[in-house]
Amino acid sequence: MALFAAGIAMGLAGACMWAWAVHSGQFRDLETTKGQLFWPDLAPPPDLAPRVPVQTQASESPEKV
């Protein structure tokens, strides 16, 4: 029974980590990360890598006075 509970707890922890990573934007621009991990000598330097703009929720536009 303890192994079953431990397995459920680890599964929930993994799901929470995945949800956090998606929410915080950790899964954006995976192709650049893949290149840096598997082919570091071919990856562009960090200052030349294309930056993906972070989309934020725009608040309502201010009313014109």
Image (cartoon, rainbow, N blue to C red):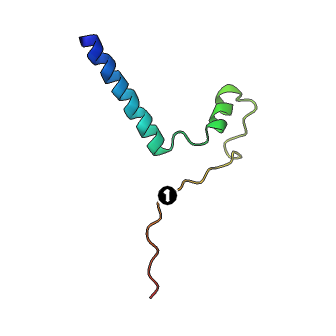
- On screen, 20 above or below 1? below
**Front one among 17 and 41:** 17
Q: Image check: 17 left or right of 47?
A: left
Residue found farthest to the bottom: 65
- On screen, 59 above or below 2? below
Image location (x, y in percent) of residue 23: 44, 44
Residue found farthest to the right: 42
Q: Quadrant of residue 7?
A: top left
Residue found farthest to the left: 1
Q: Quadrant of residue 9?
A: top left
Image location (x, y in percent) of residue 37: 64, 28
Q: Image check: 47 left or right of 56?
A: right
Q: Image check: 39 left or right of 52?
A: right
- On screen, 6 above or below 46? above
To which residue does mark 1 refer? 56
Image quadrant holding the N terminus, namely top left
Residue drawn at 41 percent across, 39 percent down: 20
Instruction: Count neighbours of disc 1 (C-alpha within 10 A) and say few if under 14, some if 14 to 19, many if 20 or more.
Output: few
Q: Secondary structure at mark 1?
A: loop
Q: Image check: 18 left or right of 44?
A: left
- On screen, 4 above or below 11? above
**Front one among 15 and 65:** 15
Image location (x, y in percent) of residue 22: 47, 41
Instruction: Give the number of callouts.
Output: 1
Image location (x, y in percent) of residue 28: 57, 42
Residue drawn at 31 percent across, 21 percent down: 8
Residue drawn at 42 percent across, 38 percent down: 19
